[in-house]
Image: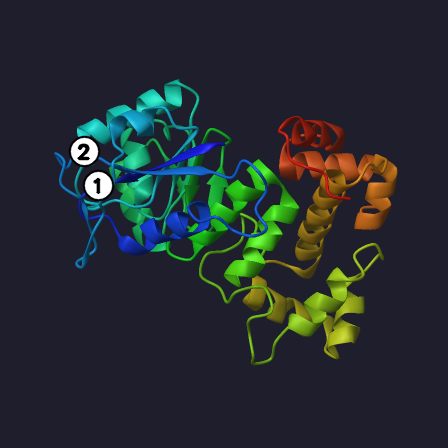
Amino acid sequence: MPSIAVAVTDGIPFFELAIPCHIFGFDRIQTPPGWYDLRVCAIGTDGAGPRTGPWFHARTPYGIEELVTADTVLVPGSADVHGDPPDELVAALREAHRRGARLVSLCSGAFTLAATGLLDGRTAATHWMYAALLAERYPAVTVDSSVLYVDHGDVLTGAGSTAAIDVCLHLVREDFGTETANSLARQLVAPAHRPGGQAQYIETPLPERRDDSLAPLLHWATERLRRPLTVADLARRANTSPRTLVRRFHAATGTTPMQWLQTQRIGRARELLERTDLPVDRVAELSGLGSAANLRRHFTRTVGVPPNDYRRSYRAAGVTRTA
């Protein structure tokens, strides 16, 4: 079971703490064997339960020792973005990283990760309201105020509030595969996949809108990913002009129609690589990426490894193939 330690200090925001506890901490009907071992770790409270928000206290038997030895350490928020995090927590995060842990921050938790020095020379995300302050306090960090999350492999930083759900689903996708992440997203009534580079402050990109909704078009397009769809094709289906469609698409998803299609096709390719033994050229055809060479190029650029390597590492991780 991969272990996740959630660092809780006095005064951290409750919402960002609740999200990982809800996603990683409950047994769910459709989760695979070996689901996460969640440890909520109180830091710097001398045995008292840390206060989370103005109404709650977190009572937990876990502390620094469990945090340092966890596979993933998640910092859900900073109690004070203008002050310094507890020295004990900063030292524990550095030690956990040295031991090979993956470090993840949500929202203002990026200030805590920045204090460790592990974000120096890297790009980091945080809530757009805090971006200027993070850049001012930690000038060695390149702050991107526009994206949902930035994943460097060993360190991941996420934007604020509901983007924490995207970050947690991204972790599930990396650890247990696309099918499990999609299933969990359905249970949460959340978008299955919003790529990290998507803009923060936009309307949700999946079928949640009721006014002038693109949901029928998005559904229609996802059912036809293997076809060579163009902006003109999508505009005709939506009964609008290509220029109007591009404008509506960007307002709804923060990206262009063709970029959105590419993301969906990479997601379909991941699912096929995880669930089937189809050769790479067939995966490329079914996902709409055309040739095996085209799949390899775009898949490697997006996911970070070639398709065959991704399939091997997925199988080696012990995730059960279901189809």
Q: Position of residue 1 (x, y in %)?
A: 49, 32
Q: Secondary structure at mark 2?
A: loop
Tell me which residue sits at (32%, 20%) in the image. 95
Tell me which residue sits at (41%, 52%) in the image. 22
Snapshot quadrant of residue 8: top left
Q: Are marks 1 and 2 in contact (CB under 8 Å)?
A: yes
Q: Position of residue 179 (x, y in %)?
A: 65, 48
Q: Nearer the viewer, residue 94 or 298?
A: 94
Quadrant of image for the C terminus: top right
Q: Position of residue 275 (x, y in %)?
A: 74, 42
Tell me which residue sits at (51%, 39%) in the image. 35
Mark 2 nearby-residue class (10 Å; few <14, some 14–19, many ≥20): some
The answer to whether 36 is drawn above or below residue 202 in the figure is above
Between circles 1 and 2, the one closer to the viewer is 1
In the displayed orientation, state which residue is furthest to the top.
Answer: 99
The answer to whether 145 is drawn above or below residue 70 in the figure is below
Circle 2 sits on which residue?
86
Q: Nearer the viewer, residue 194 or 144?
A: 194
Q: Secondary structure at mark 1?
A: loop
Snapshot quadrant of residue 172: top right
Residue 138 visible (yes or no) = yes
Q: Is residue 139 left or right of residue 266?
A: left
Circle 1 sits on which residue?
9
Type of residue at label 1? Thr
The answer to whether 98 is drawn above or below residue 131 in the figure is above
Q: Is residue 8 left or right of residue 182?
A: left
Q: Where residue 221 is drawn, which disc sits there?
A: none
User: Exactly how many numbered labels are in the figure?
Assistant: 2
Earlier sequence position, callout 1 versus callout 2: 1
Residue 159 visible (yes or no) = no
